[in-house]
């Protein structure tokens, strides 16, 4: 299949699976049309790259369905010039979608092989404003905090206080939260200018669990 064919499939994905289901932010839709999702999965699965479901990427991890990636990105309401912390780099796809929307993406992946692979791919794709490091997402990235936006692509039992502390006043955090795969909700946390926290659930989701680093 040619790159032009993948581009056509990607545009149809955005129109029929994402925009048609209510994602309307033009910057998010443009990013979803631009990022080649097939490059973030094994080549044996490229023919499924623009279908609206998760796919395996190795190391017992998955790439999220495109609609959820787009929806979570829209919920963040990212403004140009903001800095975003992502917990759970995985394939690097979510970071790639965030890249054209922000000043810089700081992304943490606990699985060494995934961190290495995604960092190499993002560099190959020319996304110079994404920094990936291997580490424990529960610790966040204190030396670069605070962040205007934080996104989790793996589900903790509850949102770590460390990450809430690293959220800038006036900032927003989006995460799947729940102790089991069958008991997760997409949650939005907003920190007011005076530091008060407001949390609300959006709807049920299913994400891989967020893993703690070894002590």
Image (cartoon, helix red, strand yellow):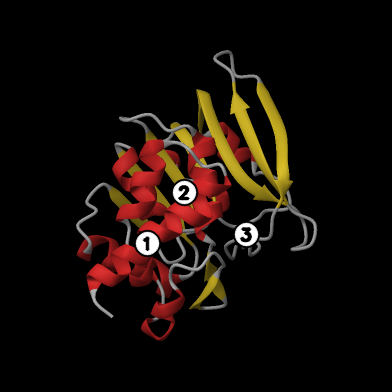
The residue tagged with tag 2: helix, strand or loop?
Answer: strand
Q: Is residue 144 visible?
A: no
In the image, is 206 to the left or to the right of 93? Answer: right
Q: Position of residue 103 (x, y in %)?
A: 29, 36
Q: Which residue is mark 3?
A: 210
Residue 10: mark in rendering: 1
Task: Name the residue at 66% across, 62% down.
Answer: 209
In this picture, is 204 found above or below 102?
below
Q: Residues within 10 Å of mark 2 (few under 14, many from 20)?
A: many
Q: Residue drawn at (59%, 57%), measured in percent from left and top?
A: 154
Task: Give the number of the mark in front: 2 or 1.
Answer: 1
Give the number of the disc on residue 86: 2
Quadrant holding the N terminus:
bottom left
Looking at the image, which residue sits at the far bottom? 44
Query: Is residue 141 or residue 12 the one in the foreground?
Result: 12
Look at the picture and state if 39 lies above or below 96. below
């Amino acid at each position: 299949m040619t790159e032009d064919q993948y581009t056509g499939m990607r545009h149809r994905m955005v129109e029929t699976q994402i925009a048609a289901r209510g994602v309307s932010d033009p910057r998010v839709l443009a990013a979803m049309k631009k990022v080649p999702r097939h490059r973030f999965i094994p080549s044996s699965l490229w023919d499924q790259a623009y279908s609206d479901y998760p796919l395996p990427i190795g190391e017992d991890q998955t790439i999220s369905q495109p609609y959820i990636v787009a929806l979570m990105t829209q919920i963040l309401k990212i403004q140009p010039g903001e800095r975003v912390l992502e917990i759970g780099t995985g394939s690097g796809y979510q970071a790639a979608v965030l890249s054209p929307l922000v000043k810089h993406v700081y992304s943490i992946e606990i699985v060494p092989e995934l961190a290495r692979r995604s960092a190499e791919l993002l560099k190959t794709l020319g996304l110079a404003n994404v920094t990936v490091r291997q580490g424990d997402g529960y610790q966040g990235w204190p030396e670069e905090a605070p962040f205007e936006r934080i996104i989790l692509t793996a589900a903790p039992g509850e949102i770590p206080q460390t990450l809430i502390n690293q959220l800038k006043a006036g900032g927003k955090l989006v995460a799947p939260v729940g102790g089991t795969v069958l008991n997760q909700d997409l949650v939005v946390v907003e920190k007011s200018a005076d530091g008060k926290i407001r949390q609300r659930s959006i709807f049920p989701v299913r994400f891989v669990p967020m893993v703690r680093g070894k002590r």
